[in-house]
């Protein structure tokens, strides 16, 4: 009986130590999403009317510049999705990775044009 009692005392004493031996795993880090996704490099007019994204310019060396986009172009579709405003543009860029090529439809004056743009990694990312 003393042996049984001794074994029970040892087991009871060891239980808290066993629980402490393996600390709980830290919570998984949430995926980090920086910026607006892939880099396009346009400088949009932030005062939009819902009729497309008017560019006030493009960043030097950007995918937009390389594709020939310029100030005053009005982007109306990206990757097959209508882009009446900045929220829609951001949504498109967030769903594409650097290196992917998307089709961009825009107005330059009275002429509707289409161009392929290869998205890039945001500088400094």
Image: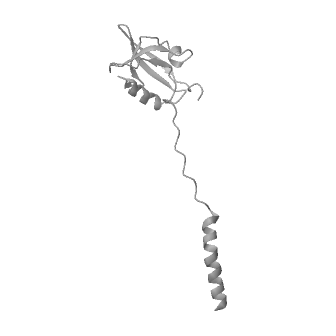
Residue 78 % position (x, y) = 41, 23
112 is higher (above) or lower (below) than 11: above
Residue 44 % position (x, y) = 43, 18
Front one among 49 and 51: 49
Front one among 113 and 83: 83
Front one among 116 and 17: 17
Residue 17 % position (x, y) = 64, 69
Residue sitting at x 40%, y 20%: 46
Residue 53 shows up from this direction: yes
State the residue lying farthest toward the bottom.
1
Residue sitting at x 63%, y 69%: 18
Q: Is residue 51 left or right of residue 115?
A: left
Q: How many marks?
A: 0
Residue 71 figure quarter: top left
**In what quadrant of the picture does the C terminus appear?**
top right
109 is higher (above) or lower (below) than 50: above
What colour scheme governs how the chains and residues are painted in the rendered image of this protein? one colour
58 is higher (above) or lower (below) than 125: above
**In what quadrant of the picture does the N terminus appear?**
bottom right
Residue 95 shows up from this direction: no
Residue 37 % position (x, y) = 50, 30
125 is higher (above) or lower (below) than 49: below
């Amino acid at each position: 009986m003393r042996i049984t009692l001794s074994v029970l005392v040892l087991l009871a004493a060891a239980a808290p130590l066993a629980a402490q031996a393996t600390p709980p795993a830290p919570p998984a880090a949430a995926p980090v999403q920086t910026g607006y996704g892939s880099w396009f490099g346009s400088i949009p007019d932030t005062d939009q009317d819902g009729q497309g994204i008017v560019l006030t310019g493009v960043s030097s060396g950007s995918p937009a510049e390389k594709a020939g986009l310029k100030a005053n172009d009005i982007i109306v579709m990206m990757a097959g999705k209508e882009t009446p405003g900045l929220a829609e543009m951001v949504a498109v860029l967030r769903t594409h990775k650097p290196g992917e090529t998307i089709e961009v439809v825009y107005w330059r004056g009275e002429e509707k044009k289409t161009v392929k743009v290869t998205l890039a990694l945001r500088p400094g990312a």
